[in-house]
Image (cartoon, coloured by chain):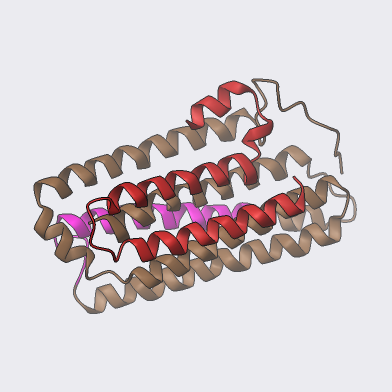
Chain colours: A red, B brown
Amino acid sequence: MMKNAATITWFILILLTITSALVSKLESKYVVLIILTLSVLKFFGIAFQFMEIKKAHVFWKTLRL
Amino acid sequence: MNTTAIDYKNIWYPPGGILVWIIIVLELFTFGAALIAMAYYGNQESELFHNSSLKLNTTYGMINTLFLLTSGYFMAVSVSEIKKGNKLKSQKLLLLTMLFGMLFLGLKSFEYVEKLNEGITVGYNTFFAFYWMLTLFHVIHVLVGLVILASVYFGIRKENSNTKIEDIEASAAFWHMCDLIWMMLFPVIYLLF
């Protein structure tokens, strides 16, 4: 994995985590949806970039979905 | 160390090997099912779950998420460096990976002590039964992951190391699994209710 790609992924994951913590304080009916969407994005960020599932057979990529 | 290129497109060899991936998939399904059950009970006892979640410190949860993400980042770069043959750099990054894993455990222990001092144990109510069971089960995985990483670290430190790149990738996959599980636990336990 390229170190730059890992660094960018890490930075985005940190931003998404802070965003989800801030969003949870809001009073809106969409809060749950936003938090879950951000979590799914973080999940895929880790699986595809850190775990290198992007390089794996399509079967393993699909299983992540 | 053998760093022969592996064909990841082979269905039988996802990064880390198929055995660790069978474990990962089973673990994610187990935690996923428990979280669905938690959401179901949360829907049944919404006021209790809301009031209970207010007793949790979101900042602790967020900082712990940052610790695990940073640890996962160092792990990913460590694997990348060992593949390039930078053994020394990889070792240092592995140490950082373990350090952030231990920071996670330190803050989690602090949170547990706080809860125990407040009399909030596993039998306190339904929300905290899920909280204790899920987070403790996750902590056990982190502890096992740290033991695996320590064994890899001492393995690659040897002059005539017989640690294979597949072993390092499998350990990394297990460590990242701990991240994935926490990415599911953190929003549901700390933020949703």
Q: Is residue B77 above or below residue B63?
A: above
On the image, the x and y values in percent for residue B48 come to 11, 59
Q: Magenta residues: mostly which secondary structure?
A: helix
Q: Is residue B150 visible in the rendered structure shown here?
A: no
The answer to whether B174 appears left or right of B154 in the picture is: left
- What quarter of the picture does the C terminus of chain B occupy? bottom left
Q: Quadrant of the N terminus of chain B?
A: top right
Name the one closer to the observer, B165 or B53: B53
Q: Residue at x 50, y 32 (%)?
A: A64
- Please give the name of the residue rendered at 57% of the width and 28% of the height, measured from the top-left corner: A61
Instruction: Write down the quadrant of residue B53 in the picture.
Output: bottom left
Highlighted range, magenta = B120-148
Where is residue B98 shown, x and y percent of the image? 62, 63
Q: Residue at x 71, y 45 (%)?
A: B168
Query: Where is B73 relative to B166, above or below?
Result: below
Query: Relative to B5, is B64 above or below?
Result: below
Rendered location of residue B163, percent (x, y)? 78, 45
